[in-house]
Image (spheres, rainbow, N blue to C red):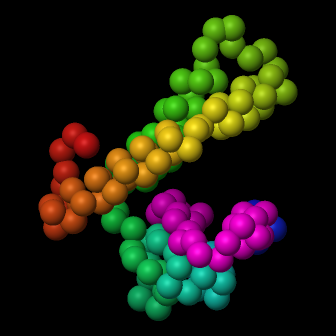
Amino acid sequence: MLQTRLFLQLQADSDDFVFQQDGAPPHWKLEVRRYLNGELPQRWIGRKGNDDLAIHPWPPRSPDLTVCDFFLWGYIKDKVYVPPLPTNLEKLKIRIKDAVNALTPDLISNVWKEFDYRIDVCRVAGGGHIEHL
């Protein structure tokens, strides 16, 4: 998926990006990290081994720092699961696409401001535990 879709699209849009992934076990496999080290040296964030070329290690147990976790999944869920509920897979896909297409530039900008704030709070806490962001 990364090779055949995501990175091709990202590189077509711009080569000025940093790829972020969480620490899920499939993302931590040596094969994945070797691929990221080769394709995006110093341009990825994730769980980091000793020889990995991630720009930053991702803080463990930190879902409040990921845009998808603190915003996107809840936003999509709130848009998709409203009555009347989708009755088949095709209608569900349409709802999901409509929810994603409803993201406005202003909304995305505000989410990134919130992300910056959360990162600042994490820095001030020295990477330690943070209550109720």
Q: Position of residue 123 (x, y in %)?
A: 21, 65
Direction top: furthest residue: 84
Q: Position of residue 8 (x, y in %)?
A: 77, 70
Q: Position of residue 129 (x, y in %)?
A: 18, 55
* Residue drawn 43% across the image and 52% down it: 112
**From what the image shows, is residue 78 above or below residue 12?**
above
Along the viewing direction, whichever of 80 and 104 lies nearer the viewer: 104
- In the rendered image, is residue 31 in sight? no
Direction right: furthest residue: 90
**From what the image shows, is residue 123 above or below residue 100?**
below
Quarter residue 99 falls in: top right
Q: Is residue 127 left or right of residue 11?
A: left
* Residue drawn 76% across the image and 70% down it: 12
Task: Give the residues in magenta.
Answer: 5-30
Q: Position of residue 33 (x, y in %)?
A: 58, 79
Direction front: furthest residue: 106
The quarter of the picture where the C terminus appears is: top left
**From what the image shows, is residue 97 above or below residue 111?**
above
Along the viewing direction, whichever of 13 and 74 lies nearer the viewer: 13
Q: Is residue 26 left or right of residue 101?
A: left
**From what the image shows, is residue 62 above or below residue 108?**
below
* Residue drawn 59% across the image and 24% down it: 79
Q: Is residue 5 left or right of residue 67?
A: right
The quarter of the picture where the N terminus appears is: bottom right
- Please tell me whether residue 20 belongs to the stretch shown in magenta: yes
